[in-house]
Image (tube, rainbow, N blue to C red):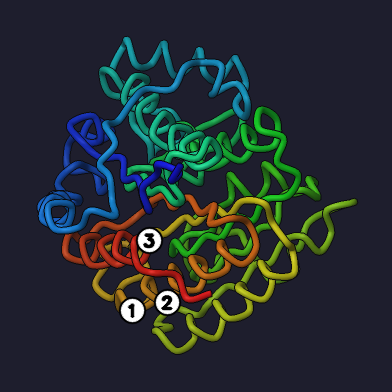
């Protein structure tokens, strides 16, 4: 009997629009409007991708990474609907807790879909909220769906080694420091140098601590860096992933490194996303049965978001070159 699965599940729908900060905040649903339109057209023409309706996570998933005190704090602020969840970047709004549950739910659904065999790859465009720490929000991120999925893969699915690759313009500090001492989590992160951009972390000397020393690779790039420096850095990431021999690969594919993003200083084109997903797609089939889960991350220019994330969607359904 032929195994029933799709090449790539893509979680997107009305629920995806709820994680949207008000009053002109950079992270609001307008940034994904063009992507939403192009994704619909893509899905109509491509039978290797399957649209998956967004679903909410439960609190137990949150507690795989976050503290109970922090989760309760978000619930409280969500009911009040005012104030901030951090020091000023991440405002509360009515229903922010429930909206954040959907963001996490889409990513953990993708994890389960891949490991249970219903699809090879998965893409949650509204995921990749990599700045949230165990006990606090940060950088527009309430709950860290990437870190939660990593923790779930290790604890609930018995995965022994994972690789997390992050190409967002900002260093994925919540994931990095959340697993800095965990030797089962290999992290490769390309980002704008922390001397010039939030969160001010992710320097080359940060390679993990204790038993995890050497399992982390930070590759900061100078402001103004374009495709060439990225390609060189990503080749190092690909070698790092190959040598780590993961059983599962995560990709945070923020679009905020593309030229014209309003809050960063890199000069990529969408070719970097095509390059990254092609490399990781191939590696996932070589190393871990095609297990590749992508999450959208940042990006505040709607044209850039559409270009970058459609490159990811197309890459996930392309024939792998193994």
The residue under the point 77% across, 48% down is 184
Distance between mark 1 and mark 2 Cα atoms: 6 Å
In this rendering, would 131 be left or right of 11?
A: right
The residue under the point 61% across, 40% down is 150
- Contact between marks 1 and 2 (CB within 8 A): the answer is yes
On the image, the x and y values in percent for residue 124 come to 36, 44
> Which badge, 3 or 1, comes first in the chain's sequence?
1
Within 10 Å of the Cα at label 3, are there few (<14), some (14-19), or many (20+) other Cα atoms? many
The residue under the point 37% across, 33% down is 103
On the image, the x and y values in percent for residue 246 come to 69, 56
Picture mark count: 3
The residue under the point 33% across, 79% down is 271
Q: Name the residue under label 1.
A: 271
Q: Mark 3 points at which residue?
A: 316
Q: Mark 2 points at which residue?
A: 275
Q: Quadrant of residue 23?
A: top left
């Amino acid at each position: 009997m032929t195994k029933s699965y799709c090449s790539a599940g893509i979680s997107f729908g009305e629920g995806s629009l709820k994680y949207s900060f008000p009053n002109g905040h950079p992270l609001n649903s307008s940034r994904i409007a063009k992507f939403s339109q192009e994704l619909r057209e893509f899905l109509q023409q491509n039978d290797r991708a399957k649209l998956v309706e967004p679903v909410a996570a439960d609190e137990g998933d949150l507690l795989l990474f976050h503290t109970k005190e922090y989760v309760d704090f978000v619930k409280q602020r969500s009911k009040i609907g005012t104030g901030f969840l951090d020091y000023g970047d991440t405002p509360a709004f009515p229903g922010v807790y429930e909206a954040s549950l959907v963001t996490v739910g889409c990513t953990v659904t993708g994890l389960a879909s891949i490991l249970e065999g219903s699809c090879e790859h998965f893409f949650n465009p509204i995921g990749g909220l990599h700045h949230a720490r165990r006990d606090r929000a940060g950088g527009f991120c309430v709950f860290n769906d990437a870190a939660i999925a990593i923790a779930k893969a290790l604890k609930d699915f018995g995965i022994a080694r994972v690789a997390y690759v992050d190409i967002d313009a900002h260093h994925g500090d919540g994931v990095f420091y959340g697993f800095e001492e965990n030797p089962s989590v290999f992290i490769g992160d390309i980002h704008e140098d922390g001397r010039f951009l939030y969160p001010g972390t992710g320097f080359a000397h940060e390679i993990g601590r204790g038993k995890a020393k050497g399992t982390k690779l930070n590759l900061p790039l100078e402001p103004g860096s374009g495709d060439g420096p990225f390609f060189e850095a990503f080749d190092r990431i690909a070698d790092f992933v190959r040598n780590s021999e993961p059983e599962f690969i995560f990709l945070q594919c923020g679009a905020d490194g593309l030229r014209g993003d309003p809050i960063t200083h890199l000069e990529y084109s969408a070719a970097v996303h095509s390059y990254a997903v092609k490399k990781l797609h191939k590696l996932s089939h070589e190393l871990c049965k095609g297990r590749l889960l992508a999450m959208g991350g940042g990006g505040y220019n709607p044209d850039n978001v559409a270009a970058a994330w459609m490159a990811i969607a197309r890459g996930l359904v392309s024939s792998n070159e193994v």
